[in-house]
Image (cartoon, coloured by chain):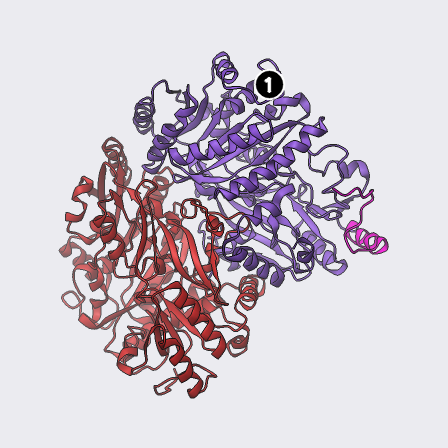
Chain colours: A red, B purple
Amino acid sequence: MSTQAPPLLPPGVSASDFASALDELASGCTVLTSEEELAGFRDPFQFSTWEEYAASAVVMPETVEQVQEIVRIANRYGIPLWTHGRGMNTGYGGPAPRVDGSLIVSLRSMNKVLEIDEELAYAVVEPGVRWFDLYDAVRAGNHRLMVSIPDLGWGSVVGNFLENGATYLPVAQDMAAYCGMEVVLANGELLRTGMGAMANNRSWHVYKRSLGPTLDQLFMQSNMGIVTKLGVWLTPWPECYMPLWLKARNEDDLGPIVDTLRRLMLDRTIENVPQIWNAVAMASVISSRAPWYQGDDPMPDDVIDHMARELGIGRWTMRFAVYGDEAVVDHRFAKIKKEFERIPGVEVWGEKHAPEAMDTLEHPFDRVQAGVPNLGINQMTGWYGGEEGGHIGFSPVARLTGPDAVACRDLLRGLVEREARLDYAAVLIPTNSRSFIHVTMVIFDTKDEGQTRRAYDTAKLLVREAGKAGYGEYRAHLDFMDLAAEQYGFNDHAYMRFVETIKDAVDPNGILSPGKQGIWPRAMREARD
Amino acid sequence: MSTQAPPLLPPGVSASDFASALDELASGCTVLTSEEELAGFRDPFQFSTWEEYAASAVVMPETVEQVQEIVRIANRYGIPLWTHGRGMNTGYGGPAPRVDGSLIVSLRSMNKVLEIDEELAYAVVEPGVRWFDLYDAVRAGNHRLMVSIPDLGWGSVVGNFLENGATYLPVAQDMAAYCGMEVVLANGELLRTGMGAMANNRSWHVYKRSLGPTLDQLFMQSNMGIVTKLGVWLTPWPECYMPLWLKARNEDDLGPIVDTLRRLMLDRTIENVPQIWNAVAMASVISSRAPWYQGDDPMPDDVIDHMARELGIGRWTMRFAVYGDEAVVDHRFAKIKKEFERIPGVEVWGEKHAPEAMDTLEHPFDRVQAGVPNLGINQMTGWYGGEEGGHIGFSPVARLTGPDAVACRDLLRGLVEREARLDYAAVLIPTNSRSFIHVTMVIFDTKDEGQTRRAYDTAKLLVREAGKAGYGEYRAHLDFMDLAAEQYGFNDHAYMRFVETIKDAVDPNGILSPGKQGIWPRAMREARD
């Protein structure tokens, strides 16, 4: 890690040029440059004295035209930009830029819900709109619509989509609940995808493809443009909502649970995106480590068993939900209960609710699956460190079969416990009927530099070792974006070479988020290689 | 149209160079050059003496390595290639190339089903695999899996996906039933998308995204690469399959039908992709025009009503299906029947089947929605011309609301009847809960040059007029690809300029399918503009 002192400059930009650029930017937008202000734009969980991933300044546009102007100014001065919606992606580096001295383009002030269409069940939002804001707008308009949301409501709707973040309603399997975007390109021009490429076309946010290649996914997890509008598909209220719980006693129940789940997802008995939590992860939502174990070594199995019993949680706990006509919900619940309870000791239960009652539910899981944003599980990071806890997400993809889930679990649990000497906290997210994301929460005390360093190092070890075993990250933390991308080495990294060919063509000055997901513009590639 | 005599040469390539290139190609692959052989690679419905859209030769690789070698040879000699899987996309130009003298790369001999995974319900196919072949392979393996198929079984599975073609099972809403591709790039290199970019990753065909931008849709409806493998999601047999029919008496029932349908699709009571046929289109499946009307003008309303009554079809007929546990199917059918039959005169009916019986069903609609490939509706093109009928598909996208459907119908029916003096034959395909594709079948007698010319001209008129009204094509016939693309003019064609920037970067010699969907390489753009 470098130890460059603030005020930072963008790489290769002189102090006077940067001052001129900031003057130009400040004529239209709010610009932040003070040390105190910039402190809020760091990786929230890195140790306090670490200097890496620091911005030179932050600019906060309020309009699309201002975003275009920022891009033009950045091109003129050669300033690397780094964009976020809200920057609340805390387990992956938050708002911090990959390249020290980047100018952060914070889109937090572009926070308008531009449209809600109740009949066709979609909304159009700007990138600063939080899940809380979208939900509030839907409620304020008395629309009988649900929003498919992630676990924490404070993040950007657009940002979550752009990072392939999971949400949990049926409409969001395969992260597919978006439709139609507007993008500011690296040359400052405005592009609209899909039917939006026709100026007067009213199907922009209802049909997902273009005539010709569809570009939306080229702007996701990438640095090819700055997304300024996104269509988001909503869900009409069902007659009945039934959040469900599954509890399993044994660590090895994971295999049969996953096999049963796959069959029930493939036949659409379960249509939403479930989550399967191990005991440590689940305990971190409602407790902390200290009451159960004080050892420096990973929590032993008998302690986990004891803790799980006392907390009334399983070695594995699955949350999921069914939605629909009450008759269908009843049928599905009976079938689900019967299928899972074939596994000895497994219990499945739940309660039906009318849609009017969704926002009165108490448990954060019940609220999230009803599309009611909250911050209920945010205390998870306090597992080791109380208020000052942090986490790094390591999240590879695997096939949704029992043997695959067990193999992936064994590999990652072994590495976390053996190499990092940390507790293994895992949440498996089947984002469709055929695959799951194994979110490994590497939790640590951010006040403890040694433990924090070990956590960051562990994450990189996991990337490498999982890569050797054929498991790839679905998204990557700032600190190991390059390493995660490097694992995708088929045919001498043909994928990345193709992506970087496109990057050079559409952003020849390498202005937009250099290094994002391991994609570097030509001028900076040599330093990496 | 040009009148260049065969043998054609690729543009800008000398006869001796082309002969050398063909020699190199023929050392590894079958090469076709005779007039008789090339006759099978024309637009199947253009008038017999028209000379446009003719290839110089056809090369038929059998392996990925041969495709790579073909691309390298084409780069060396500057020969434009034009690729198809089976070339059976007859309403959009069939196997014919956009640029006269192109070398057709026919992938018909790459026809292996490489993998069928019953547990995770997917297959991996080469581009020459037909729907018939994939179905046969599933049956031969005794897999209890269904294939989501289009109406005609003779086409390429990969080709249909690459053109955003619709298929009809729930898994295929938004044409989303693909996962993971292998592509030969313009430089001859091999790329794999998604998890396939990691050599030993087993999640290639089960998880849809990449780490970094997801490229699959960049290779669809485009000319950025040649797809050599594709993962296709299959569907486990349901307990019960119930194909359904809806018949409506009045032309104006369309509005309420569409509004009811949208609600039932949004709440997932109807999960598959329905089709709504008007009377002329439906009649063309089971009859022809002559028995009902001999006038040169469009068939008048009273004749349509008479014909519909006699044939036992509606002014609108909807085909759709429900799948699942019998209890759920029963509930859904009762609900569907009740909701639609609120519309005076509308009837809904159907019959339940066990999956074992699916391939014994007789009606092509019942077979298609069960995933049993056939050619049952291929006689549609005989409406005017008997055996020699042709059709051009004009297929804009619209919002799935009653008023939008009626407005789109009024516009297109008016143009087809008033300008082309042809019967209006339409099939509305709601590929998701929020939009539909209005497939306008411009049917004509291919033996009648005047009528054929009028049909081709009409299609272009429709593109232009629909574009003015804000309706864009979801795919485009060879003969009006440029015109269809031109309608997407937002911000001075920012979409196309961006796509062509990518095209120039990844295919600098402009070898791959120049002109495809209006995307031209730099060297040929000036001629267009």
In the picture of the structure, the residue carrying the numbered disc 1 is B288
User: Could you tell me which residue is drawn at 20 percent across and 68 percent down?
Assistant: A382
Report whether B338 appears left or right of B45.
Answer: left
Residue that protrudes farthest toward the front in the picture: B418
In the image, residue A185 above or below residue A43: above
In the figure, is residue B270 to the left or right of A320? right
Quadrant including the N terminus of chain B: top right
Q: What is the crowding at mark 1: few (fewer than 14 residues within 10 Å), some, or many (at least 20)? A: many
Residue visible at 39% across and 63% down in the picture: A64
State the image quarter where residue A44 is shown. bottom left
Q: Is residue A524 left or right of residue A91?
A: right
Judge whether residue B87 can be spotted in this image.
yes
| Percent x, y of residue B144 | 46, 33
Which quarter of the rendered picture does the C terminus of chain B lie within?
bottom right
B145, B464: nearer the viewer: B464
Query: In terms of image quadrants, where is residue A383?
Result: bottom left
Q: Residue at x 59, y 26 (%)?
A: B422
Q: Residue furthest right?
A: B16
Q: Position of residue A461 (x, y in %)?
A: 40, 70
Placement of A469 over or under B326, stated as above or below: below
